[in-house]
Every structure is written in C-alpha cells, then in structure tokens.
Amino acid sequence: MEEFEQWAHARSGALARSAYLLTGDRHLAEDLLQETLTRVAQRWRKVSRQGAPDAYARTVMHHLAIDVWRRRRSRPAEVLGAPTPELGAPEGGDVERRLVLRHALAGLTVRQRAVLSLRFYEDLTEVETARVLGCSVSTVKSTAREALARLRATAPEHLAEFAPGEG
C-alpha cells in the first residue's frame, strides 16, 4: 500500500484540478477526488501491475462525474465557486478573463466539461477520450464541437484562440 500512497501523493494535485474542472465546485471536487482515490486503492494491485494507474484514475473520475450528473440532471445548473487553492491563479492571469471563462464553463454540461478537460487539459486524443468516457469517437467529436460552440458564443473575445482548428 506504500506504493499507492506515493502515487496518490504525487498525483493528487493534478487529479484535484481535473475534478474541479469536471464539477466546478471545490467541495464536489474534493468528494470526487476522494471517491476516485478510494476506488483506485481498492484495485491498486491490478491497476499497478497493468502499469496505467493514471489512466485508470481518469476513467474512474470521469465515470463518477457523469454518474453524479445523471442523478442530478433535473436540478438547476451548477454555479462555479471560487477556485481551489491548489489551482492557484495563473501567473500574469487576467482576472476578468478567468471570471468570464469560469462563467462560460459553468454553462456546460458535465459531459461537455469532461470531453474538454480530457481533450485540451489532459491532452488526450479523441479515441483515448472516447475510451475513458465509454462512448464513441463521434460522440466525443460532437460533444466537443457543441461545447466549444457554446463557449465561443458565451465569451468570443476570450476564446478566439481556444482549441484552434476544432469545431
């Protein structure tokens, strides 16, 4: 279990940022991270033998986020809160731009945020993203296209350079 603890300590920051991107809420992100780490720990021997604990953790996290979204689908849209301390502010970051982007991301569904975070934050291919989310490549493409269109409509002046060539 020491190996798992070392891995979890090394990867918790990146996983926390991914969880925040998926949930848009610090407390929900903490819950998502905790549940993800619990599930990875439960299968650590097999996951570590296969040599892909990061990929397994991403898959678990995104599936859990989508499951929560499905259960809460009938509730009003989520509102993103203050950024978590682990995320910090980008150096030289423009406060107005960050607020606009946060607001724009709040208007996306969890699946749309999952696709964008995997494609552009985690830098996965469409095939890898589809595998993580358990959907088809065409679903990834259409979801990314719709999410980017929504982001561009919400904040066109701040997103002109976002995902060039997509959409």
Image (cartoon, rainbow, N blue to C red):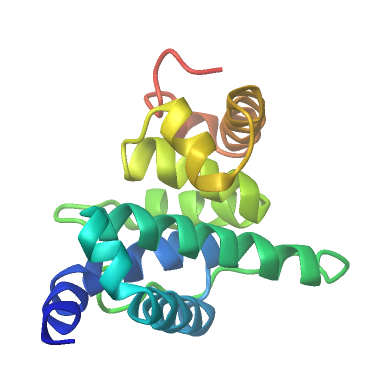
Give the percent coordinates (x, y) of residue 149.
Answer: 63, 27
User: Can residue 89 be seen?
Assistant: no
Give the percent coordinates (x, y) of residue 108.
Answer: 65, 49
Query: Residue at point 39% right, 81% down?
Result: 42
Query: Residue at point 34% right, 71% down?
Result: 16
Q: Which of 84 and 73 lies nearest the eye of the viewer?
A: 73
Query: Residue at point 35% right, 35% down?
Result: 124
Is residue 35 left or right of 167 when viewed as pictured? Answer: left
Which residue appears farthest toward the top when viewing the image?
165
Q: Establish if 145 lies above or below 10.
A: above
In which quadrant is the N terminus drawn? Answer: bottom left
Query: Residue at point 53% right, 41% down?
Result: 115
Q: Which of 46 and 108 lies nearest the eye of the viewer?
A: 46
Q: Which of 167 and 61 lies nearest the eye of the viewer?
A: 61
Write down the quadrant of residue 15 in the picture: bottom left
In which quadrant is the C terminus drawn? Answer: top right
Is residue 27 left or right of 90 when viewed as pictured? Answer: right
Give the percent coordinates (x, y) of residue 60.
Answer: 48, 63
Give the percent coordinates (x, y) of residue 128.
Answer: 42, 34
User: Can residue 124 be seen?
Assistant: yes
Q: Which of 153 and 69 lies nearest the eye of the viewer?
A: 69
Q: Establish if 51 lies above or below 125.
A: below
Q: Establish if 32 lies above or below 155.
A: below
Count the labels in the image: 0
Write down the quadrant of residue 49 in the picture: bottom left
